[in-house]
Amino acid sequence: MSNPKQAVFLAVAALALLAGCNQQGGAELAVTSIFPGDGYHGFKNGDQIVLEFNRPVDINSFLAAYHSSNDGLLPNQISYSAADGGKKIIIQPGKPLPYSSNENYLYYSFRLDTSLTDLSGHNLKQPLSVTFTTLRSLSATILADAAFDGVVSASLATNDEESLFVGDGNDNEAVRSLWGFPWPDGMEGVVEATLRLHPVQRIGTPFIDLGLINIEPVDLGEAIDLADYSSAALALAITDDRAGLMAGITKRYNVSNFAREAWNHGLARLDLRLRFTADSDNDGNGDYLIFYAREAETEAIRPYLSALELTYYAP
């Protein structure tokens, strides 16, 4: 017959062992969460690799278990630290991982072998292998939002016309054109941006009477209104050279800095205003350029609408 005291002792010991295993998350070391996960697209400069485990890890065993052949992720390049009581390892790449210069993915990978241990000497249950990509460079031609291409003067603001004007009218009132180009879905940053302008008609002699074209970034807010005529520009204008804008000819302007600043400041669009240096020559004769507005869009005129030719970062 077994000893009752011995049986009670064994039962208590078994319960204590079970409780200890439960507190430590199981008898074997395992990964419970990974960023970036295997197959992740869009790892960005400044992001960190974060590994979470079911038990505190012996950080001294990490470097021998970590492997990568990618520049920036090599074992002698990364920095790493423990967090959350040792259950989390945070890896900082040794240098920014390059983004793809086109729509193709650039792949990066790392792995952990089973020599990684917890504080009790238990090895990682199974090896870990992760492959991910950085951002890509995509291109798009973006037309203005119909609600944000329009004209504004001291007395009128509208976005429901089929034509846009810049210059002065027979009443000597200056008119300025506005365009708001929305960001594409999934965008993570600006590579470069070009404004495409195509005047369809020129009335009078605006470049003689009113000076040069000025392209300036603004913030149109929630809607076009009278304040957009004289609101402060967000940066110094791009001033056209004296060749000017020829009716029927497409001309392009580099607005990359405008686009980057608008994106970095959290604006929903790149908003641009077009004006001549002088508001009016006060001669009672109209001098202005005419552009197609988004409200007049058809397949035939789409190539002649003002547009933002944008190269941008995306997953």
Image (cartoon, rainbow, N blue to C red):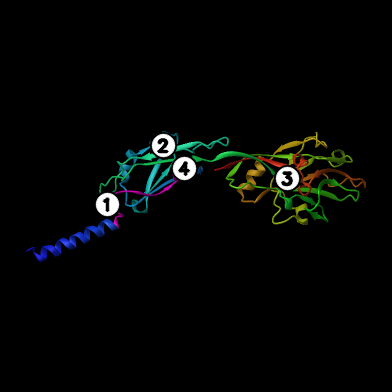
Q: Earlier in the sequence, mark 2 or mark 1?
A: 1
Region of the chain picked out in magenta, as a range: 23-40
- Quarter holding residue 203: top right
Task: Mark 1 vs mark 3: give the one in front.
Answer: 1
Mark 2 neighbour density, 10 Å: few (under 14) some (14–19) many (20 or more): few
Position of residue 315 in the picture relative to residue 121 (left or right):
right
Which residue lies under the disc numbered 1? Answer: 27
Q: Secondary structure at mark 3?
A: strand
Q: Earlier in the sequence, mark 3 or mark 2?
A: 2
Position of residue 231 in the picture relative to residue 69 (left or right):
right
Q: Secondary structure at mark 4?
A: loop
In the rendering, which numbered label is found on residue 77? Answer: 2
Residue drawn where x is 25% and y is 57% of the image: 20
Q: What is the CA distance from the residue labelled 3 to the residue labelled 2?
A: 44 Å
In the rendering, which numbered label is found on residue 39? Answer: 4
Could you tell me if the residues under marks 4 and 3 are in contact, i.e. CB atoms within 8 Å? no
Position of residue 292 in the picture relative to residue 182 (left or right):
right
**Nearer-the-camera pick, 222 or 110:** 110
Q: Position of residue 15 (x, y in %)?
A: 22, 61
Q: Earlier in the sequence, mark 4 or mark 3?
A: 4
Residue drawn where x is 14% and y is 65% of the image: 8
Q: What is the CA distance from the residue labelled 2 to the residue labelled 1?
A: 32 Å
What residue type is disc 4 on?
Gly
Which residue lies under the disc numbered 3? Answer: 216
Q: Earlier in the sequence, mark 1 or mark 3?
A: 1
Q: Position of residue 310 (x, y in %)?
A: 65, 40
